[in-house]
Amino acid sequence: MANKRIPWDQYFMLQAVLISSRSTCERLSVGAVLVRNKRIIAGGYNGSVSGDDHCIDVGCYLVNGHCERTIHAEMNAVLQCAKFGESTDQAEIYVTDFPCLQCTKMLLQAGIKKIKYLREYHNNEYAERLLRKEGVVVEKIELDHHQLEDSPLADYFSID
């Protein structure tokens, strides 16, 4: 009998992917899930400050090639913890895209000890050096459709 449970890494990464579907950014949809002791403590996606216009509605507010309106998914997840009083110390994050330099620095300051990501995205050399220096575990996660074929997910999706 096959094990119908997907591995933890794929479980949490799939939730980050699902959360990314709430993104209001036109350029890239990113999702993040903060986890401690195999329990989700927060999730976030990239989008505007609550109450502000959304890029998908009015276009991006670009300055020097960067959207000034967008809060990154990792930041939104950490801010949810701050807002609701949940510690991020010793947590891990599952994020659909490798964190930018600013998010990397924020994650380090928040005490994140593991960063697991799905896709490479303009990986910053200094960010990678900081992560190595601080001993943060960084791992690229694969979503292997063969692992999902024998799970209940196969009932919902056409997995080829």
Image (cartoon, rainbow, N blue to C red):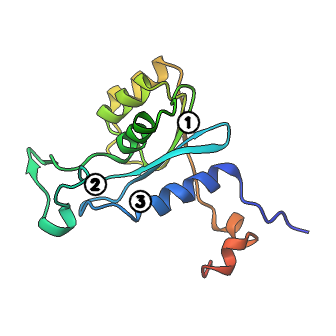
Q: Is residue 75 above or below residue 150?
A: above
Q: Name the side, left or right, on which 60 lies relative to 110.
A: left
Q: Residue furthest left?
A: 63
Residue that appears at 83% across and 63% down? 3
The N terminus sits in image quarter: bottom right
Task: Estimate how packed mark 3 is, as few (under 14), some (14 to 19) or many (20 or more) residues with alpha carbons within 10 Å.
Answer: many
Q: Is residue 34 visible?
A: yes
Which comes sooner in the sequence, label 3 or label 1?
3
Name the residue carrying label 1: 92
Mark 1 or mark 2: whose residue is earlier in sequence: 2
Query: Which residue type carries mark 1?
Result: Glu
Q: Quadrant of residue 25?
A: bottom left
The amino acid sitting under disc 3 is: Ser
Q: Amino acid at mark 2?
A: Gly
For the residues carrying marks 1 and 2, which lies nearer the camera in this image?
A: 2
Element type at mark 1: strand
How far, Cα to Cα, is label 1 from label 2? Answer: 22 Å
Q: Are marks 3 and 1 in contact (CB under 8 Å)?
A: no
Q: Nearer the viewer, residue 13 or 111?
A: 111
- Side of 129 relative to 35 (left or right): left
Where does residue 106 sit, x and y in percent of width and height?
36, 29
Q: Position of residue 78 (x, y in %)?
A: 42, 37
Instruction: Please tell me which of labels 3 and 2 falls first in the chain.
Output: 3
Q: For mark 2, what is the residue?
A: 47
Q: Residue at horizontal 23%, vertical 64%?
A: 26
Residue at (21% x, 67% y) in the render: 56
Around disc 2, counting alpha carbons within 10 Å, would you say few (fewer than 14), some (14 to 19), or many (20 or more)? many
Above or below, comparing residue 77 to residue 14 in the picture: above
Q: Which mark is residue 20?
A: 3
Q: How busy is the neighbourhood of tag 1: few (under 14 within 10 Å), some, or many (20 plus)?
A: many
